Amino acid sequence: MTRVGLLGYGIAGRVFHGPLISSTEGMDLVAIVTSDPRRQAQARAAHPDAKIVTADELFELDLDLVVVATPNRTHVEYAKRAIAQGVAVVVDKPFAPTSAEAAELLAAARAAGVPLTVFQNRRWDSDFLTVRKVLGELGEVRRFESRFERWIPEVWDNWREFGAPEEAGGLLYDLGAHLVDQALQLFGPVRSVYTELDLRRPGVQVDDDVFVALTHENGVRSHLWANAHAAHHGPRFRLLGSEGAFEISGLDEQEDALAAGRRPTDSGWGHEDRTGTLGVLDRATEVAVEPGAYQHFYSELQAGRIPVDPAGAVAALRVIEAAFMSARENRVVQL
C-alpha cells in the first residue's frame, strides 16, 4: 500500500484529494493535517482510519506520498520538507506563488530523485477531454476561447480573497492556473501575453475579473476569462478552425459529485448528459461529452507514472507572471 499524508482539509483536501486518494486501489490515507475543529470532525467522519495530526507530526510518519493542499503561501515550504525527506509529493495548483520558487522545487526534486507532480485535475474535465477528441476535426485552429465564470457577488472570508502578495490570491492564480494550463496543453508555448484585471465587487482585495489573451508560437490565439460576478455564463469552450468550430457550455460535474459524497468507484461516474456542437453553421451536429476522469490522476501516480509534468506548471506560472505584468503596465508582454 502507498501510505499517504494529506496536508490541508479545506475545499481541495476535503472535496478532491481525500475522496480521490481513498478511492484509488493501493492507496491508504493514513494522516490528515487540519487545525480547524469543524474540519477535523469532517475528516474523522469521512476517513475514520486516518489520524488527525499536526504538520510536524505528519513529517515524522513513515509515508510514501505527501499531498500539499494547504493555502498557496505554504506550498513551497511543505513541498521542500517532503523532498528533503525523500517522500514523493503532490502539490495542488498553483504550484508555487512564483515561477522561480516552482523551478527551485523542481530542481530540488530532480536532484533528490523524488517524484513531484502538480494537481491539475481539470485536464480530466469531461469538456476538456471532449475538446481533445474533436480537435483534429476543426482543421487549422485559429482561436481558442475558455471561460470559468461564477456568480459570487459578495467577498468571502478566505485566503483566496486576501490581498497580501504571499497569499497568491485572486482569480488569475486560482482559476487562471487551470485556464492557462489547458491552453498550453492544447496549443503549446506562448510568445506574447495581454491581460486585463479588475477588482469589481465591493471590498474585494484581489482580481475577480480576468481576461487574458495569449498568442502561441504556432499562431493560435487563446482568449481566457475568469469572473466571480457573472450573472450569466458564456460558453465554457469555443474553438474556431479552418474546417469548422466547436462550442460547449456548462461545467464538468465531478466537483459537485465529489462534494455530494459520490466517488469514482460509483457506477456511471463522470458521465453527463451535456453535449457540444461541432461543425459549420446549419451543418453542425451534437457531440456527446466524454466522461470526466479525475480518478486518473491518482491511478497514474499509483502505477508509478507522473500524471502532470511539473515543468509544465513552471511554464504556466511564467505566463501568469507575464499576465500580471501586462495588466500592471497596460501593454503586451513578450515571453
Image (cartoon, rainbow, N blue to C red):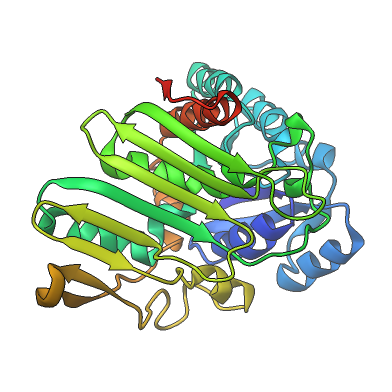
Residue 216 lies, with reference to residue 239, above or below; the image says above
Q: Is residue 101 left or right of residue 35?
A: left
Taking the image as drawn, is residue 239 in sight? yes
Taking the image as drawn, is residue 173 in sight? no
Nearest the viewer among 18 and 282 is 282
Residue 63 percent location from the top left of the image: 65, 42
Residue 206 percent location from the top left of the image: 72, 42
Residue 4 percent location from the top left of the image: 63, 49
Identified at 48% across, 48% down, the residue is 178
Identified at 82% across, 56% down, the residue is 52
Identified at 79% across, 52% down, the residue is 158
Residue 42 lies, with reference to residue 298, above or below; the image says below
**Residue lying at the far right of the rendered structure:** 37
Which quarter of the rendering shows the C terminus?
A: top left
Residue 309 percent location from the top left of the image: 41, 35
Residue 265 lies, with reference to residue 329, above or below; the image says below
Q: Is residue 137 left or right of residue 290?
A: left
The total of numbered circles placed on residues is: 0
Picture quadrant where residue 80 is located: top right
Residue 304 lies, with reference to residue 105, above or below; the image says below
**Residue lying at the far front of the rendered structure:** 330
Identified at 44% across, 72% down, the residue is 250
Picture quadrant where residue 315 is located: top left
